Image (cartoon, rainbow, N blue to C red):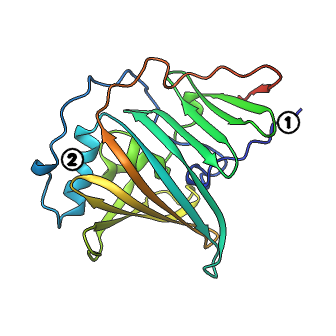
Amino acid sequence: MKAFVRLPRFLQRVSGRLAFGVASLVVAAAPTAWTPAAAADGNDARAQLQRFVKEVRTASGSFEQTTLNADGRVIDEQRGEFLFARPGRFRWEVTEPFPQLVVADDEQVIQFDPDLLQASIRPADAAVGSAPAQVLFGEGDIDEAFAIESLAREGELAWLRARPESAETGFAHLDIGLLDGLPQEVEILDAFGQTSRIVFTQIVPNPELPDDAFQFEAPEGVDVVRMP
């Protein structure tokens, strides 16, 4: 039976592959104190993003996501929570309107749709690529995979645009709005002209995360399919 798992839109548009920058997943460094007052110049979005990638090793928070079609009409809305531990452990859980879950750990990436009672599992090394999630939750030099340019400041947020160097990523560009060294909003324009807008709230940088935060055990009755 072929698995059909509905992925959260933030993790779609990657030529059929998830991509968390998980080529070599390891246990994240011990959490360190976060000092917003010491953040980079608030007008320099690139510096804020670089600091976020370098210093925020783990994080938790909530998100609200709205997807618009090419005409600007809302076609999907989602809310949920996320966790991550660099350089690739990740949990993206949609709670409304329909539960969905994507979890990446040391060895595999799990996609679970409770409504369909299906879960697909693939090796972590098969999920490598350049995706929106990699910009925020991966590790390393983002300039190697993305062309970065500064955008006009909007209110309190300093914005930048990341364009993937590869044409096979499935999205045209990713805009990130940052405040005090943390991402607050993200806008993704995909290859079909659709825009996904994500607002992050209640972000906690460098929290202590439980050992089982990125583990998944399929409930009884769930059809589990292992992908090559």
**Residue found at x 79% / y 40%:** 115
What percent of the width, then of the height, locates residue 181? Answer: 23, 52
Residue 34: quarter of image:
top left
What percent of the width, then of the height, locates residue 146? Answer: 38, 57
**Residue found at x 48% / y 41%:** 82
Q: Hey, which residue is sitting farthest left in the picture? A: 38
Considering the image in quadrants, where does the C terminus appear? top right
Q: Is residue 19 above or below residue 197?
A: above
Q: Nearer the viewer, residue 178 or 1?
A: 178
Q: Is residue 199 above or below residue 111?
A: below
- Amino acid bearing label 1: Lys
**Residue found at x 56% / y 52%:** 79
Say whether residue 53 is left or right of residue 163: left
Q: Secondary structure at mark 1?
A: loop
Q: Which residue is mark 2?
A: 51
**Residue found at x 74% / y 36%:** 114
Say whether residue 70 is left or right of residue 207: right
Q: Which residue is mark 1?
A: 2
